[in-house]
Image (cartoon, helix red, strand yellow):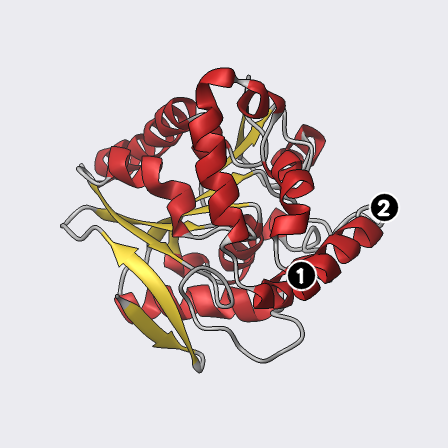
């Protein structure tokens, strides 16, 4: 099991290897690097794909802190990129991974070739969500994820995925993965609930940026993506016609095509500049 020690913790990661330009994938809360399996499979033939688990999630180590704060998770990602020697890389962050990606792009642009932000926001958690998410988190801490699996699934996935009879097996697989989270996942959830906004920082982002959101995302609604697009100079916004808060799983073909086109365009731009 590949582990990397950074910032006094151990992060699990998977590296496709090869000589291609590196792409680092940073997942959303309650999941793991499995969130990007369809994208790694699609891209690993021409890119070096690296997907990792945040501290306190997936197979990475769990610190004892009450809150795994976003600043620490950001520093973990910086250390991972530096330790693996893959900077500058393309960075793809979904939801919580997007919180990380925005911080890197604004503060350490030397580490990035481009940034992809999926189903994410530069703002703090909306106040109307906090009581509900806090209650769900407390329940998960005391009793595990099983009692809250149904409402969390409706947060994480859009209407099309949740109601398609042909995708019942996929839904079951992801529900099982959700319930397999350790009870100490509450530490990471606190970090998301209590995070600071970084909207004041992201106008400083200058790396090529793609903002992607599913039209059915109710956790981070499309208006949040539109705000990111307005704040990040020169960014591109793509609204997928379907897909909720986990579009990499729900609409892999749409995401793969969108992501592949964007990444390939960055390679072509660099090549033309070098000629």
Quadrant of the image occupied by residue 218: top right
Q: Residue at x 55, y 71 (%)?
A: 72
Tag in front: 1 or 2: 1
Q: Is residue 69 visible?
A: yes
Disc 2 is placed on an element classified as: loop
Residue 229's place in the image compared with 82, above or below, is: above
- Badge count: 2
Residue 29's place in the image compared with 256, above or below, is: below
Left or right of 120 on screen, residue 110:
left
Tag 2 residue: 128
Quadrant of the image occupied by residue 185: bottom right
Q: Residue at x 65, y 39 (%)?
A: 150
Quadrant of the image occupied by residue 221: top right
- In this view, the residue in front, 192 or 207, is 192
Q: Position of residue 189 (x, y in %)?
A: 64, 60
- In this view, the residue in front, 143 or 25, is 143
Distance between mark 1 and mark 2 Cα atoms? 24 Å
Quadrant of image for the N terminus:
bottom left
Q: Residue at x 38, y 47 (%)?
A: 34
Tag 1 residue: 143
Q: Position of residue 80 (x, y in %)?
A: 37, 67
Q: Position of residue 101 (x, y in %)?
A: 50, 53
């Amino acid at each position: 099991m590949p582990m990397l020690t950074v910032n006094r913790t151990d992060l699990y990661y998977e590296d496709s290897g090869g000589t291609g330009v590196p792409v680092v994938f940073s997942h959303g809360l309650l999941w793991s690097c499995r969130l990007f399996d369809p994208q790694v499979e699609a891209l690993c033939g021409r890119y070096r794909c690296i997907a990792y688990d945040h501290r306190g999630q997936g197979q990475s180590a769990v610190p004892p802190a009450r809150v795994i704060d976003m600043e620490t998770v950001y520093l973990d990602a910086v250390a991972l990129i530096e330790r693996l020697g893959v900077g500058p890389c393309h960075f793809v962050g979904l939801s919580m991974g997007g919180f990380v990606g925005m911080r890197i792009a604004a503060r350490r642009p030397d580490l990035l070739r481009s940034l992809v932000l999926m189903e994410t926001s530069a703002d703090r958690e909306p106040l109307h969500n906090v009581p509900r998410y806090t209650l769900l988190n407390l329940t998960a801490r005391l009793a595990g994820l099983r009692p809250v699996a149904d409402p969390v699934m409706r947060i994480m996935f859009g209407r099309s995925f949740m109601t398609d009879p042909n995708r019942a097996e996929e839904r079951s697989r992801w529900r099982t993965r959700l319930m397999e989270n350790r009870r100490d996942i509450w530490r990471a959830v606190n970090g998301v609930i209590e995070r600071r906004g970084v909207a004041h920082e992201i106008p400083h982002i200058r790396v090529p940026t793609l903002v992607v959101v599913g039209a059915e995302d109710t956790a981070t609604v499309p208006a949040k993506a539109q705000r990111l697009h307005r704040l990040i100079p020169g960014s591109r916004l793509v609204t997928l016609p379907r897909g909720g808060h986990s579009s990499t799983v729900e609409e892999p073909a749409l995401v793969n095509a969108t992501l592949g086109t964007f990444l390939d365009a960055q390679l072509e731009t660099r090549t033309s500049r070098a000629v």
